[in-house]
Amino acid sequence: MKRYSAFAIAREALRNHTGWDRAWRKAQPKNRYDVVIIGAGGHGLATAYYLGKNFGITNVAVLEKGWLGGGNTGRNTTIIRSNYLQDPSAAIYEKSRSLYETLSQDLNYNIMFSPRGVMMLAQTQHEVRGYLRTAHANALQGVKTEFIPPKRVKEICPIINLDGPRYPVLGALWQDRAGTARHDAVAWGYARACSDMGMDIIQKCEVTGIRQEGGTVKGVTTTKGDIDCEKLGIVVAGHSGVLADMAGFRLPIESVALQALVSEPIKPVMDCVVMANTVHGYMSQSDKGEMVIGGGADGYNNYTQRGSFHHVEETVRALVETFPMISRLKMLRWWGGIVDMTGDRSPILSKTPLENCFINCGWGTGGFKAIPGSGWGFAELMAKGHSPLTEEFALTRFREGKFIDESVAAGVAH
Ligand SMILES: Cc1cc2nc3c(=O)[nH]c(=O)nc-3n(C[C@H](O)[C@H](O)[C@H](O)COP(=O)(O)OP(=O)(O)OC[C@H]3O[C@@H](n4cnc5c(N)ncnc54)[C@H](O)[C@@H]3O)c2cc1C
């Protein structure tokens, strides 16, 4: 595959852009692969990429029932940060954030990583204590974060109203190398690199069954026929429970719709990301000028991949208190995705009761930021049978009570 470069852009400009290759091949399934990954979201594609890059395993198929990146990966609000509380979380999220720093160069694809800084507002004394605790934990973990006073909050984000009637801003947890990236580009960049290594990304190929014998997976049944494999990775986010059911085991996961919306585009007013978790809303500004606004998850389990009026109303009402200027904006569009929530709000990257079957899920409302780190660790787990990054995230923790409680860092926030 030809590399993208300034020289290539100049060359194509001179010949009416007729020389670009397809970013990834249109593949048809073979009968057998060394590894089959179900789900061409960011996590599935990143897993395939690091299987090839770090372990030389390239006889890989990634099967996708819709279009690649069409699940949560293409529906999120793109916040990237690593200021979690517990050590295993800090390790995998910081690995991920650091991979994001050079991902465009690594993939030769501009994923538009923008380390513009992420701020989590403390609007109650309880939150102040919680974020101070996180800042201290991050210092011990080597993750660079700081707790900043209201004056500094206002300097970084002048449109904030510090003296809201119910919840004044008392400070914030600030991570200056956190930020955003273009979500589609992350999926497309990984897909292009996987295809370049000879892997097959097969879209419109739904897995409808998992064939097994004596506790070992033999292959999958799909809408494009049977495919055999040596190892199987299930990476389907909100549909993890459905796939686990096909494989014959149960997961401690709930699937719910999570929603977001964008305003009409306006001139630049905000060059960082702000989360207001007490009032339950967060906001950033896209490169196109839209205010990207996210809210909470539905309070009941469902597979409804769309937005709803009451969430829009609740989220905007909450944010107006802290950002009065948004009351005059018009909403452009809104949408939803199905997220997979665990009880401790931490992911599952694990072996399963089936010998050669692995599962990566439970990223809930915050897995976009984790895509490179999760792919790195999960590929190692699939290739070698263990990985220091994923060890604590095994399914067995729910039986043994070794929860990784991230309800403060990830319960509401993204
Ligand atoms: C509104 C919203 C806002 C969010 N904001 C943020 C944020 O700001 N920051 C952040 O870090 N995270 C955020 N998230 C969470 C983040 O988007 C997800 O955690 C992450 O994208 C999960 O990626 P994935 O690859 O696991 O799943 P997905 O991208 O959902 O990919 C799974 C794929 O599996 C496919 N699939 C399912 N069943 C089958 C089958 N039977 N056969 C074949 N394929 C199948 C699906 O079609 C899908 O494409 C947000 C999510 C939503 C919905």
Image (spheres, helix red, strand yellow):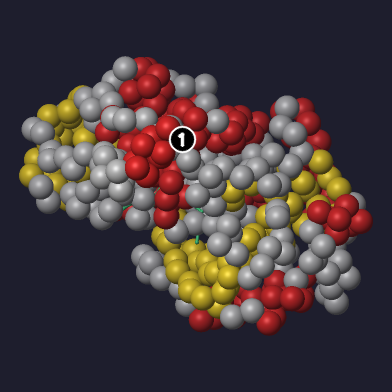
Q: Residue 184 at what x, y percent from top left?
A: 42, 50
Question: Which quarter of the figure is the N terminus placed in?
Answer: top left
Name the residue located 48 percent from the left edge and 74 percent from the top edge: 333
Observer able to see residue 245: no
Task: Tell me the kind of residue under disc 1.
Answer: Ala
> At numbered mark 1, what does the secondary structure look like: helix, strand or loop?
helix
Q: Residue 64 at what x, y percent from top left?
A: 25, 48
Does 148 sit left or right of 26 as displayed?
Answer: right
Name the residue located 44 percent from the left edge and 66 percent from the top edge: 336
Does label 1 point to a residue whose CB lies under 8 Å from ligand 1?
no
User: Observer-nearest residue: 146 or 249?
Assistant: 146
Instruction: Work out whether 252 lies above or below 189.
Output: below
Observer able to see residue 31: yes
**Residue 249's quadrant in the figure?**
top left
User: Observer-nearest residue: 101 or 23?
Assistant: 23
> How many numbered discs sit on the rendered protein?
1
User: Observer-nearest residue: 351 or 94?
Assistant: 94
Does 151 sit left or right of 256 as displayed?
Answer: right
Q: Residue 340 at what x, y percent from top left?
A: 44, 53
**Residue 219's quadrant in the figure?**
top left
Instruction: Work out whether 198 lies above or below 124.
Output: above
Name the residue located 73 percent from the left edge and 27 percent from the top edge: 142
Name the residue located 74 percent from the left edge and 52 percent from the top edge: 119
| Residue topped by disc 1 | 6
**Residue 187's quadrant in the figure?**
top left
Please tell me how crowded label 1 is: few (under 14), some (14-19), or many (20+) other residues with Cα within 10 Å: few
Q: Residue 57 at what x, y percent from top left?
A: 29, 20
Does 298 sit left or right of 125 as displayed?
Answer: left
